[in-house]
Image (tube, grey):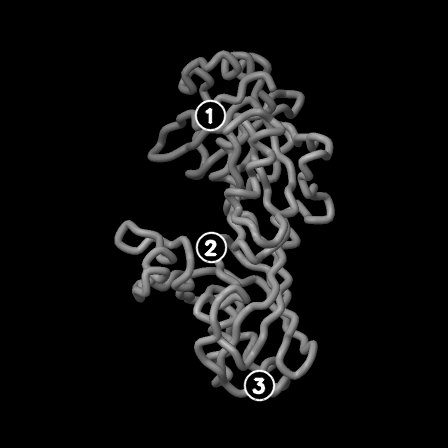
Amino acid sequence: MSDGLFLLDKPRGVSSFRALAPAKRLFATRKIGHTGTLDPFATGLMVVLVGRATRLAQWLLPLEKRYEATVRFGEATDTLDPEGTVVETGPLPDPTDVDRILSEFTGEIEQVPPAYSAVKVAGERAYRVARRGGVPTVAARRVVVSAATMAPIDTRDYELSLTCGSGTYVRSLARDIAGRLGTVAHLTHLRRVAVGPFHVDNATSLEEEGPVPLLLPIGEIVPHMPGVRPIHLSERQAEAAYRGVPIAALELPPQPEGDYVLLSESGAPVAIAAFATGRWRYRWVLGRL
């Protein structure tokens, strides 16, 4: 079975789960995952992990994401996207007011996910409650928006460019910006263009008759994992780690708490380890990749 990462350009109109179906057939495996869902109406980049590389998802999830969206002011839908029903209308904003308040939505902000989202409420997905006609009580969360710009396309539509952390809902951001302007809005278009160093320009559409995409090997994925610091091993230490010898036998010096990638003298990743409460432990022994 192949192990590694490839970039998928998800088409509009399918869920993230269904978008992976062709990859499962192409690689003849069910062991496939990704580092962040996209709504069915959205398009763009999904970072897809295959085989053993799926174990790296937890370290890739924090990568920043970049989006391009179209915000339509004056109309709110129940889903906050073009697939919903218009439930409220409002005035169109003045472009100077949009520029003035946008800085309030950068940095660490509090955001309530949409009612039509996969967030769990009392053990059930919020969208399931909403589809039954219920009103799910979705808790606010802290998210990080590193950068946001908006430019008018016409009197009601604005182009939104956004760089944000994991867990940010662009639909909620459009709703909240509109609310601050005394009106309502929804997204008519959403495209994820980048995840960390990975860009949609390098992604495949994964057509059924197309070639099997080349996988980025696990050893080349590890350097892109944020917050994982490198430690270089001697030849003796690396050989012991390759064999899964208990990490205490490697005699690694104490480090600040966190995750580390243990590298051989040649720079090849050998294992991922954590230092916490004064002790080292393996998170995953990669072995000879």
Disc 3 residue crowd, few under 14, some 14–19, many 20+, Cα 10 Å = some
Query: Helix, strand or loop at disc 1?
Result: strand
Calculate the distance from the C-alpha at mark 1 to the C-alpha at mark 2: 25 Å
Residue at 42% x, 57% y: name it. Answer: 117
Total labels drawn: 3
Q: Which residue, given by chain and number where applicable, does mark 2 sit on? A: 167
Residue 220 tag number = none
Other residues around mark 1 within 10 Å, as few (<14) / some (14–19) / many (≥20): some
Q: Nearer the viewer, mark 3 or mark 1?
A: 3
Q: Which residue is mark 1?
A: 284
The image quarter containing residue 210 is top right
Residue 75 in sight: yes
Question: Whole-percent x and y of residue 14?
Answer: 55, 49
* Closer mark to the observer between disc 1 and disc 2: 2
Q: Quadrant of the C terminus?
A: top right
Q: Nearer the viewer, residue 273 or 200?
A: 200
Give the mark nearer the N terminus: 3 vs 2.
3
Q: Residue at x 54, y 81 (%)?
A: 74
What's under tag 1, amino acid-wise?
Trp
Q: Earlier in the sequence, mark 3 or mark 1?
A: 3
Q: Position of residue 153 (x, y in %)?
A: 69, 76
Kindly identify which residue carries mark 3: 93
x and y percentages locating residue 57 in the rendered image: 50, 38
Is residue 115 found left or right of 238 in the rendered image?
left
Towards the viewer: 19 or 60? 19
Q: Earlier in the sequence, mark 1 or mark 2?
A: 2
| SS for callout 2 | loop
How much space separates mark 3 and mark 2, taking CA atoms?
A: 27 Å
Q: Nearer the viewer, residue 230 or 20?
A: 20
Which mark is nearer the camera, 3 or 2?
A: 3
